[in-house]
Image: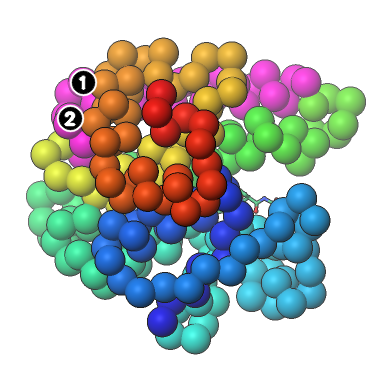
Amino acid sequence: MYRLYYSPGAASLAVHWMLIELGVPFELELIDTEARQQKSPDYLALNPGGLVPTLMVDGAPMSESAAILMLLAERHAPGSLSPAPGSPGRAAYLQWMIYLANTLLPAFRAWFYPDEPALAEASDAARGVALDRIEAAWDRIDAQLAAAGPYLLGDALTAADFLAVMLMRWSRNMPKTAVAWPHIDAYLTRMRAMPSLREVHAREGLTDWIDG
Ligand SMILES: N[C@@H](CCC(=O)N[C@@H](CS)C(=O)NCC(=O)O)C(=O)O
């Protein structure tokens, strides 16, 4: 059985949401990031970066939310949440998964942890750069939704939607939230109606954002 190490609202949310959507059995283990449990020796043995999430897969720890989403999609929804190798949608799927994981998610890390990319005295500047990068990503994603829609990659829900929606949620307290972009706003209205997204909010005790 899968075991997900999670923290409410963290990068584990997308994985937790997909596990619920897929209907596969799993156990949850809460990691209290306020208490820095993610840096405990026991957890570091599973996730050397000391980050949430970790998913135990067949007894072995796996980290990196995007990679976990891709694995779960391949294992449990072949050809639907994850376009098959060689299929027409595969290239765009890989591109968007890596863009979200490699460009947008790190910009959020720089926004939430500005001391990481810069010294403490330069953290305001680091946050400014992160904000520009996040807003540039919303421009790009909004244009993609306008051109493709109703999901990020067109007609079908994919793992990229799980990652994108989680990241959109992370913008909820920023100066300009993702819903300021009209096609993202319409997309989130549709996505927020998904029972599995509502369920993961309920299970993680998250009451803000889900109702707009
Ligand atoms: N690239 C990692 C990033 C995970 C990440 O940044 N997790 C945050 C929570 S959203 C975390 O563990 N923060 C605690 C820390 O940095 O100590 C992934 O996608 O899994």
Distance from label 2 to label 1 (Cα)?
6 Å
The answer to whether residue 94 is visible is: no
Q: Which residues are magenta?
A: 124-153
Vertical relation: 161 (above or below) 39: above
Which residue lies at the image location 62% right of the left edge and 63% below the top edge? Answer: 30
Q: Could you say which quadrant of the image residue 17 lies in?
A: bottom left
Q: Please tell me whether residue 198 is drawn above or below residue 71 in the rendered image.
A: above
* Residue 176 part of the magenta-drawn span: no
Q: As shown in the figure, which amino acid type bears the numbered disc 2?
A: Gly
Which numbered circle lies on residue 146? 1
Identify the secondary structure beneath mark 1: helix
Residue depicted at x 49% and y 86%: 59
Residue identifier under label 2: 149
Secondary-structure class at tag 2: loop
Report which quarter residue 164 is drawn in: top left
Q: Nearer the viewer, residue 59 or 206?
A: 206
State which quarter of the image contains the N terminus.
bottom left
> Which of 130/13 is in front?
13
Horizontally, residue 171 falls left or right of residue 145, namely: right
Q: Amino acid at mark 1?
A: Ala
Q: Position of residue 12 (x, y in %)?
A: 51, 55
The answer to the question of whether label 2 and label 1 lie on touching residues, with beta carbons closer than 8 A, is yes
Which residue reaches farthest bottom? Answer: 59
Q: Residue at x 11, y 56 (%)?
A: 87
Question: Percent from the top left, x then y, of residue 19?
Answer: 36, 63
Q: Between residues 34 and 105, which one lies in front from this camera angle?
A: 34
Judge left or right: residue 59 versus residue 38. left
